[in-house]
Structures are given as structure tokens and as C-alpha cells.
Amino acid sequence: APRHAAPLPHARSTLPAGLGLRMAETATGIDTAALTKAANEARGLAMDSIAAAKSGHLGLPLGCAEIGAVLYGDFMQYNPKDPQWLNRDRFILSGGHGSMFLYSWLHMSGYDLPMEEVKNFRQHHSMTPGHPEFPNSEHNTPGIEATTGPLGQGVVNAAGAAAAQKMEQAMFNTKDHTLFDSVTISLCGDGCLQEGVSAEGASFAAHEGLDNLIIVYDSNDVTLDKMAEYTQSEDTAARYEAYGWEVVTIDGHDLDAVKSSLDNFRKAKNGKPKLLICKTIIGKGIEEVAGTNAAHGEAGVAYVQGAKEKLGLKEPWEVSKDTYKFFEGVQKKNVEKYDAWKATYAEWKKANADKAKLLEDFAAKKVPSVEEMFKGIPEFDQDKNIATREAGSVVINYISDLVPQFLSGSADLHGSNKNYIKTGGNYGRGFDKSYTGKNFYFGIREHGMGSLMNGIAFHGLFRPSGATFLVFVDYMRATLRVAALAELPVTYILTHDSIGVGEDGPTHQPVETVSSLRTFPNMDVIRPADPEETVGAYVHSQQRMDGPTSLILTRQNVDTLKSIPVKTRREGVLKGAYVAKKESGDLKLILIASGSEVQHAMKAADALGDGVRVVSMPCMDIFDRQPDSYKQEVLPKSCTKRVAMEAGVTSMWYKYVGLDGKVVGVDRFGFSAPGDIVMSELGMTADNLIKECKAYM
């Protein structure tokens, strides 16, 4: 995310003259006087709130004020009294550091964001945090469509939301009723477009024909450290045209040009996403810093009083009665559209009862109960040993039937991840694709995939999942963090989970990765031991409503743990850990393992005697949330002799074995050889576990 410090300027940007910017050719009919007044008052709100907070970013809110005036004062389809209206346009502020832009316009346009909260910008428990936060257990600010701040992700979140809009249109619109026709708009700057994830998202959006996606590029020739020319020299318009986007360049302070361009974009169903390059002056309104990189942060605060006087703003946090009245008129028009939509919805529902039931379930985030889901997934052959990714290939198809809003996708690895929904169809444009397809081909774009999945989840109707090799999840790590922070119910299917990958060698053998995922707050990381635990893992992922789940699956076959009842294995996952094998004598030793190492713990317990208990712990996070009574039942404090085993780094397991316990793991990188040899050489066998336990005891 952008830093706060603002170095001294080295140059000043002004709007270019005579460069052939496309301007509005005819009058647009908008009230330019009212919008200009609102734009300047939005500037004043940003100045006052950032000055009061003594931190924040003035550049974007001031430089994009006219853009905000057109978006909220004319262009966008929304209803502040029903912020979750299904057919609303989505606005995502990709440059999340400019959050006072969003808060100012949400307040003035009538959302339930009181002026007191605007004044409390960046304060504890306020509705106006430093960067926009999607409604969650910490914040519930209406009108925020995505958690943004890490640059580049927001524009790709917008592509994900646009993809979800295409899906809802294809699923629910009929020849007699157009229920969905909304678009997604995102505002970004040079920082977002320099981040590589934006290129991945732009390529995907163009390839799949997301012509309902509009990116407004605040092109002010400035980044934080330097003027933009210091670090970039490409022709951004040409780059996006090469992707397959429609690109228009305008003066971003020209209300008519912004309005006419956006209107044309909404009408253009040409299979091309839209990029509106708005040439702006960063920090416009504070002459001392405007057009310089000093305007990015709060360097202009020292000049706020004089700047406000020049804008005709005499009071702190001044919004005129005229502006409030203007937005009352805007909302009257919006409510007329909203009421007409509700009438259409009623007619559509009467004519399409099945579709209506499905849509209402999706909107209510309804999924079958745990019992219904377990009942709907048959037991596996208990005499057949298969990889958990292979088990996943079976389970995911039942999940798709049970949870119709569940989507799947892969970063060019469907054949390896084995997460293809056989009856789901493929998403997108051309070939055998359609916008109702449940299988997304994200291409070799893990970072983009993560942001697109978040965007689909932000949209709200669908439950996305995406797959890659576990070792490559680091490419998308920044997006996992946002999913956990924003409490999004997305699922990551991460296969080839350990040194058991074998011949591909250490570049493809994760050893640190599972533990690194476990460090995320609110990320449930499940590493199932066999097919039935895999069922439990998938079911848990679809029961979660307040955060993401990572499913960690093997490439190699594992023993089906048929000595443990199927019910015990499935339900045990839902508690994070359970007693897989109970001691038959006095408890002397507890073996704890996850995933492919549970089979070794079971064999070791048989060899070590009747005082050994085996605990399968597929998910530390879930187990940690259990009542103390259950945790004590599984891991009694009376038994301090504990050994854990996992084919990965050992550090996190000491939480469960204690400092006097022992962990048998892999605290080094692997090597290229057949998987069973790598496992054996690095001690991941029952024989080595027996040896280590005997030495420990």
C-alpha cells in the first residue's frame, strides 16, 4: 500500500494542451454547476478529514473530484437506501489510499455515513478506516464494494465482479425480462497499473469479453517517490488496446467529457473492457503542491486553509444545502429506476419460479446443512488407496451439485489439480465457453486468479474456488491475505503438497508453505489424511461464511484409514483434530500428524504398544477454536509425551507437543528423485517415526 511520507517534488504536472484528447462533442445535459460545486465540497471534506487525522492521502480525492461527481451525481445505478441492491453498479476504489474520495461521495450521495464518521477518518472504531474495508466483523460501511489498498488488486477485483455480473445476466435474464444490466467501475492510478497483477487481470478480462468492466485511470503523471516518468515510459493506452480493450483519453476535470465517455462505455456491448484514461492534476485545489509528487500524501495539509478559501469553502467540513438538495434529486431518479426494477423482478419471479428460488438462495448465501452435505456424498471404497487430490476430483462434483453457487477454476492445471466440475461447463467467451460455465480457465496467472476470485466473492452471489500447485500459492499470497481480512468465503485447492512431489525437485516441493499459510489469521488450512477426511474438508469449506479455506492435497496415494469409522473421519475434520486411534492401555504417548503422515502415525502406534494414542490434526485453526473441554479430551494435559509428524517445517507443531515434545518433519529443501525415495531419505516413514519415538521415550 502507498506510504505516507511525501518527498519534495522534482517536477510539476499540468494538463497537456493540444494532444488530441477526446472531448465530449455534444452537450450531455448534466448540471455542471451543481457537479462542480459538489466536486469542490468533496475536496474540502478530504482536506478537513486528512488534516484532522494528521495522516492520509490528499492527491487522489482532490485530483479525481470531478470524476466522483459524475459517477455518484449522474452515471452510476445505485440506491443508498438499499446498498445491497442486486442490480447496482459496483464501484471499487483500487487506489484505496485515496479513501476520503469514497467517504466524501458516499456521505454526500445519501448513504448511511454520517458527517460525524467523515470527521472521524482513520480513528478507532470509525466507519472510515484508512483504506476501504468491505463490510465485515470490524466495519460495516455501506457502499464499500471491496477491501482495497494493496495496489493493483482492486482493478482485478473489479474484473472478478464484472465476471460475476456476466454470470448473473446469463443465468437469470430471460427474453421477456432483463433482471441484470449493471456494470463495474474501478478507479486506479499509475501504481495499480504498474503492479503486475493488473496486467494479468487485464488480459483475462479482454480475453473473456468483459465489456461491462470500466477502469477509470487517474493519469496524473505522478507516483509517490518521483514523477511517473522516472519509472515508466510505456504507452499505457497502446498496451491496453493490445490486450483487446477499448481505450479513450480525456481531460479528467471536464465533466462533460467524463459523462459522455462513461455513457458511451455503458452502451458499447462490443466484447471489450473499457479503459478511460483521465488526465488529471494530482492534489488539484492546493496550488502549493498540485501536480507534484508531494501532493500524494498529506504534505498539502499545511496549505488547506488557504486552499479552501480559494474554493469558496468557509466552514470546516462544509457541504452546502444546494449539494444535499442536488443529491436528493439524483436519488429520486435512482429510486425511480429501483422501483421499476422491483416491478420487473416481481413479474420475472412470477414467470420463473425455479430461477427465483435459486437467486434468492444465492443472495441469502444459503447452503445445505452439514448433515445434508455428508449424506449427499457417498463413501469411498475403503479398500482402495488414492491421492487426496484424486479424492477431491470426486468430492468437488458432489459439492457442485449440492452448492449450485460453487464455482471452480485453475491456473492452467485442471488436469493436475483434478478440480474440474464435469457437468459445470466452462466460463467465458468463444470456444466451448459460456457465461454460465462453472469452470474458470484463469491461465498461468495465480496472482490474477486470487484477485479475480476475491472480486467474484465481493460481488456476493457466488462461492469461488481456484487451484494451483501448493508451491505456487506464494504468487497469489497478497490476495489470500485480503480474502482472510475481508472474511471472504473463497476456497483454495492446493495440490502436490509436499516433498512427495518427487522428481520435479525442490522448486516444486513445498516444505515451508503449509506453515506459512497457517500464519494468516482467519485462514482455515486443512490437510486431510485420506478420502473421507477430504470430504470433511470440502464440506467445511462450503459451510464457512466468514473467511477462506485452503485445502492441501497430495499428489501421491495415501492409505485409506479404514480402521477409523467414516463418520469419525468426516466429522473429525469439522473439529480440526480428533482421536484417530485410542490407546488400549494407560496413555503414555500421543502421536499427532496431518495429511499423508497420519498413515505413518497409525502404523507406528501399532508397533509402539498399547499406551499410544494417534491424533489426526487436519486443521490447527479449527481445532484452536474448539472448547477447552474438547481440546482436553483430544490432547489431555496429563500426557506430556508427544510427538508430531508432518512432511514440512516443524516450528508450528511445538504449540501442540510442547517444548519437551518432539517434531519429526522436514526443515530443509528437498531434492529431485522419485517421491517415495525423497520421503524415505528425509525421514517421512513409519519406520523412522518408530525409531524417533523410541529414542524420545
Image: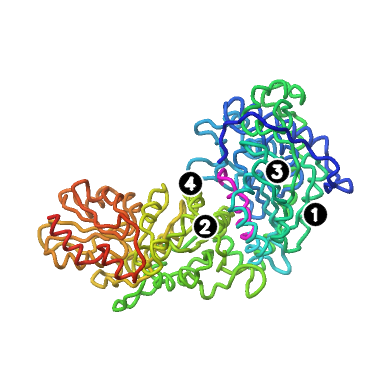
The residue segment tinted magenta is 147-164
Quadrant location of the N terminus?
top right
Viewer-nearest of labels 3 and 2?
3
Q: Secondary structure at mark 1?
A: helix
Judging by the rendered image, the residue that carries numbered circle 3 is 218
Residue 533 spot, x, y in % from top left:
34, 66
Q: Looking at the image, is 493 positioned above or below residue 4?
A: below
Query: Of callouts 4 and 2, which one flags the residue occurring earlier in the amino acid sequence?
Result: 2
Q: Let me know if residue 695 is in the magenta part.
A: no
What kind of secondary structure does the magenta stretch mostly adopt? helix
Residue 31 spot, x, y in % from top left:
83, 39
Q: CA distance from mark 3 to mark 1?
A: 19 Å
Residue 385 spot, x, y in % from top left:
31, 75
Q: CA distance from mark 4 to mark 2?
A: 19 Å
Say if mark 4 contacts mark 3, CB within 8 Å.
no
Viewer-nearest of labels 4 and 2?
4
Report the disc number at residue 264.
1
Q: Looking at the image, is 96 positioned above or below residue 204?
A: above
Q: Is residue 520 left or right of residue 77?
A: left
Q: Looking at numbered disc 1 in the image, what kind of residue is underneath it?
A: Asn
Query: Of callouts 4 and 3, which one flags the residue occurring earlier in the amino acid sequence?
Result: 3
Report the disc number at residue 485.
4
Q: Secondary structure at mark 2?
A: loop
Q: CA distance from mark 1 to mark 4?
A: 36 Å
Residue 682 spot, x, y in % from top left:
27, 62
Say if mark 3 contacts mark 2, CB within 8 Å.
no
Whether residue 394 is visible: yes
For disc 4, the neighbor class at 10 Å (few under 14, some 14 to 19, many from 20) is: many
Q: Let me know if residue 150 is in the magenta part.
A: yes
Q: CA distance from mark 4 to mark 3?
A: 27 Å
